[in-house]
């Protein structure tokens, strides 16, 4: 018998079978997520606008005053007032109707529902609601994905997000728009979390550092294609439909994406896992490979047999005691192993159902908290800089395209560095390019993996929720947002040294394996660090 990593090596750890599955998972698991998360940059873009006060009722002096209201920093160029106008009694009054420029955005939710002036923060509110939905989805699907499997949740969530996105395109009011933004956010994690888990569990430890940059390359491709779609579709309703309709056809590809063999083994479905690996081996051209997987129950039986044999050898000096022990072991071994296995399964199921297991010990609590903080600051910086791209000088479509483009070299650099230096150092040097996701998948044990990813995904969405409101500060303090984003990006450089090294080490399968990560061997001596 062999473990799963051994089986993956025997069938070809990076053959055509795995690579085709990787491509489909990355394509379906990343492009829709990046589209919907950043779509507010164009759905909620604010075009130039002015207050449409009743000029016919104004005197010549009032009309001149109306035109002479200057924006901050403008001393020569006269511009129309945006939020105030002169009333019949020469009083400055709040504007209640606006006219919008058609260029460069066309129709947006801002121009349709007048989300300007004192309602300008409603655009950021819609992004916040989306991220709240994503946070809720992280909690819900973190458990469901471990409990019911990766594949069926993956495709069901893609289909549901497509439905919610299409309904959102026909929203009659901003409130209805917010409601379906929430549902889109919830379903986002239903396919993002399984995508990360399936990519992590389909490859060996040797190939795993190279697969996660693929996920982020496809994410960057999604960021790059969004402004291209928005450039040609200048109506927010049609753009939302264009982003959502393709998701309705994703379930047709379910025949080409199998369930995670590692998850199937964890729930005792060894025959199905073996069949999937045999199919991959056939695609890889290794039809003659015989796969015989071992489960946790097999390992428990082997461990007990070894302990019994050692006990018999150690007590061989007493023949009577050996006979008694042998008889007792023969008559009770099967029942004992069965009870122990049920106990292990019961404990595993209990662990899988509780997020508190992420804080069950000193080591796992420290890792959970450190990674949570790293993801929080990373996402705050990443989403802040990306969403701010549409506020930069120049063509907003080109600016947004370049934001996605510059991510790709960093992903390839992370791929190259991960082969040459410690993964912790890669995580430190290329902190914003995806090392966080890779590390979190590698360090958590199998029973806690999806829950761990879901928990730190909450930090990501929290950072993404905070980022738009930091950008709003530039109205009063123009330089403050960029200064804050720069400062918080430095904090993980110090926290990374608290984490254990994962380079060329297998993923922990149990909590014992996880605690072994904190044991260092050097010059024949063993050290424990905290």
Image (tube, rainbow, N blue to C red):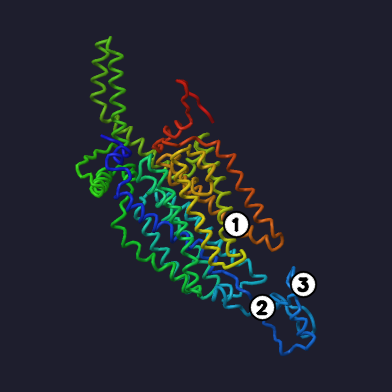
10 Å crowding of disc 2: few (<14), some (14-19), many (20+): some
**Discs 3/2, front:** 3
10 Å crowding of disc 1: few (<14), some (14-19), many (20+): many
Q: Which comes sooner in the sequence, label 3 or label 2?
A: 2
Instruction: Check disc 1 and report the residue beneath it.
Output: 467
10 Å crowding of disc 3: few (<14), some (14-19), many (20+): few
Q: Residue furthest left?
A: 288
Q: Where is residue 118 in the image (x, y as percent from the top left)?
A: 67, 70
Q: Is residue 246 above or below residue 83?
A: above
**Mark 2 vs 1: CB contact within 8 A:** no
Instruction: Look at 43% across and 35% down and name the residue there.
Output: 511
**Discs 1/3, front:** 3
Compare residues 119 and 31 and report the one nearer the observer. Answer: 31
Query: How far is the residue under mark 3 from the one under mark 2?
Result: 18 Å
Label 1: element kind:
helix
Q: Position of residue 191 (x, y in %)?
A: 41, 56
Instruction: Check disc 2 and report the residue beneath it.
Output: 50
Q: Residue 75 carries which label?
A: 3
Instruction: Look at 65% across and 80% down and name the residue there.
Output: 97
Label 3: element kind:
loop
Label 2: element kind:
strand
Q: Where is residue 464 in the image (x, y as percent from the top left)?
A: 56, 56
Compare residues 172 and 40 and report the one nearer the observer. Answer: 40
- Quadrant of the rendered image containing residue 113: bottom right
Query: How far is the residue under mark 2 from the one under mark 1?
Result: 28 Å
Instruction: Look at 30% across and 19% down and name the residue there.
Output: 310
Q: Where is residue 413 in the image (x, y as percent from the top left)?
A: 48, 47
**Mark 1 vs 3: CB contact within 8 A:** no
Q: Which comes sooner in the sequence, label 2 or label 1?
A: 2
């Amino acid at each position: 018998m062999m473990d799963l990593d051994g089986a993956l090596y025997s069938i070809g750890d990076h053959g055509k079978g795995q690579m085709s599955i990787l491509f489909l998972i990355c394509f379906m698991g990343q492009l829709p997520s990046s589209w919907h998360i950043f779509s507010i940059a164009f759905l909620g873009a604010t075009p130039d606008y002015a207050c449409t006060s009743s000029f016919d009722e104004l005197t010549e002096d009032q009309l001149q005053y109306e035109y002479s209201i200057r924006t901050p920093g403008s001393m020569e160029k006269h511009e129309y007032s945006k939020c105030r106008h002169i009333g019949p009694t020469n009083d400055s009054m709040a504007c209640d109707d606006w006219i919008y420029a058609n260029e460069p955005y066309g129709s947006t939710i801002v121009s349709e529902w007048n989300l300007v002036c004192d309602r300008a923060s409603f655009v950021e509110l819609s992004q916040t609601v989306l991220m709240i939905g994503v946070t809720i989805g992280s909690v819900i699907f973190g458990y469901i994905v471990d409990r019911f499997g990766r594949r069926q949740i993956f495709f069901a969530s893609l289909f549901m997000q497509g439905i919610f996105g299409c309904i959102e395109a026909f929203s009659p009011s901003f409130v209805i728009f917010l409601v379906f933004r929430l549902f889109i956010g919830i379903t986002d994690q239903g396919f993002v979390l399984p995508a990360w888990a399936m990519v992590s569990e389909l490859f060996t430890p040797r190939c795993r550092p190279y697969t996660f940059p693929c996920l982020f390359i496809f994410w960057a491709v999604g960021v790059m294609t969004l402004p291209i779609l928005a450039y040609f579709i200048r109506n927010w309703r049609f753009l939302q439909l264009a982003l959502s309709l393709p998701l309705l056809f994703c379930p047709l590809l379910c025949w080409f994406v199998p369930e995670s063999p590692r998850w199937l083994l964890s729930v005792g479905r060894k025959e199905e896992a073996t069949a999937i690996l045999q199919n991959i081996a056939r695609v890889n051209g290794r039809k003659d490979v015989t796969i015989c997987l071992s489960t946790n129950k097999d390992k428990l039986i082997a461990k007990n047999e070894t302990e019994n044999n050692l006990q018999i050898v150690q007590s061989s000096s007493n023949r009577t005691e050996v006979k008694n022990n042998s008889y007792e072991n023969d008559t009770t071994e099967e029942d004992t192993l069965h009870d122990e296995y049920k106990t292990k399964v019961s404990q595993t199921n209990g662990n899988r159902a509780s997020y508190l297991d992420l804080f069950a010990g000193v080591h796992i609590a420290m890792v959970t908290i450190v990674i949570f903080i790293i993801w929080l600051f990373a996402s705050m910086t990443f989403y802040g800089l990306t969403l701010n791209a549409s506020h930069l000088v120049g063509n907003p479509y080109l600016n947004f395209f370049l934001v996605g483009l510059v991510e790709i070299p960093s992903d390839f650099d992370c791929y190259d560095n991960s082969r040459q230096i410690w993964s912790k150092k890669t995580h430190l040097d290329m902190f914003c390019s995806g090392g966080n996701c890779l590390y979190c998948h590698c360090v958590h044990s199998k029973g806690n993996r999806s829950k761990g990813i879901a928990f730190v995904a909450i930090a990501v969405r929290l950072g993404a929720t905070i980022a738009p409101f930091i950008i709003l500060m530039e109205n009063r303090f123009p330089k403050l947002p960029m200064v804050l984003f720069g400062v918080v990006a430095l904090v993980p450089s110090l926290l990374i040294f608290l984490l254990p090294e994962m380079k060329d080490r297998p993923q922990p399968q149990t909590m014992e394996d996880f605690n072994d990560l904190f044991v260092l061997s050097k010059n024949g001596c063993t050290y424990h660090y905290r």
